Amino acid sequence: MRKCEKGTPGYLRDKLKIEILRTVIYFAIVAAVFLLGYSQTHSNKNLLTVAAVVGCLPACKALVGVITRFPYQTVDSALAEEVAEKSSHLTVIYDLVITSTEKIMPVDCIVVSGDKVFGYTSNEKTELKSTSSYIRKILQQNDMEGVSVKLFDEFRSFIALVEGLENIAAVEKADTKEYETEIAHLIMNISL
């Protein structure tokens, strides 16, 4: 199976599949160790039972990964293709589930152009203003002053803005790719 990088379309789906597989394998190992100990001693009071109980820790951790990712869907492939074809000069990241201590905020797509960050979310539970201010706060804490952040819940408005940013970036040809990549990595660091 190919590894899908964080920030690419399909990341959430692929990561969920990997987490499910890892969880099944871990619990199968725990069950095998327990059954091996039980089959040899005909009692659950043996050292392999202790090993199986301790083995439940990584298995449960993997299960938590499945539970946290399960409610969030990957970005629609048609949406990702449309954004990709209209943003060749921009830095684009997809499939984000931004987490803070208070909230979980799914964002389908974020486009970075210079010191401007624009995002689109199809999830109606995502509060646009609080998510924007949280991203801005994280960027400021990491010495990225003056970065403006705005999220949209209407795709047509978002894609029109992306087209405008693409036209500006194509004309200016400014070398801001490294700065944009740094912003994108900071945003991906606060995402599942």
Image: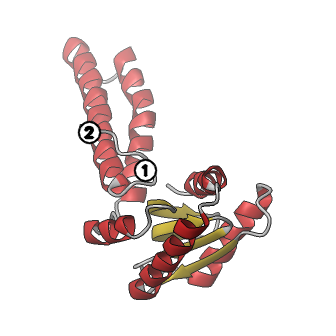
Mark 1 residue crowding within 10 angstroms, few (<14) / some (14–19) / many (20+): some
Location of residue 177 in the rendering, given as x and y in whole percent from the top left corner: 60, 53
Q: Earlier in the sequence, mark 2 or mark 1?
A: 2
Location of residue 148 in the rendering, given as x and y in whole percent from the top left corner: 69, 74
Q: CA distance from mark 2 to mark 1?
A: 12 Å
Residue 11 has which mark? Answer: none
Residue 8 seen by the camera:
yes
Residue 100 versus residue 48 in the image, above or below: below
Location of residue 49 in the rendering, given as x and y in whole percent from the top left corner: 36, 23
Amino acid type assigned to the residue bearing label 1 in the image: Val
Q: Secondary structure at mark 1?
A: helix
Pointer 2 with pointer 1, Cβ within 8 A: no
Amino acid type assigned to the residue bearing label 2 in the image: Val
Q: Is residue 135 left or right of residue 62?
A: right
What residue would you read off at disc 1? 64
Q: Secondary structure at mark 2?
A: helix
Residue 43 seen by the camera:
no
Location of residue 31 in the rendering, given as x and y in whole percent from the top left corner: 26, 30
What residue would you read off at disc 2? 24
Residue 134 versus residue 32 in the image, above or below: below
Q: At x 45% / y 28%, what residue is drawn? A: 54
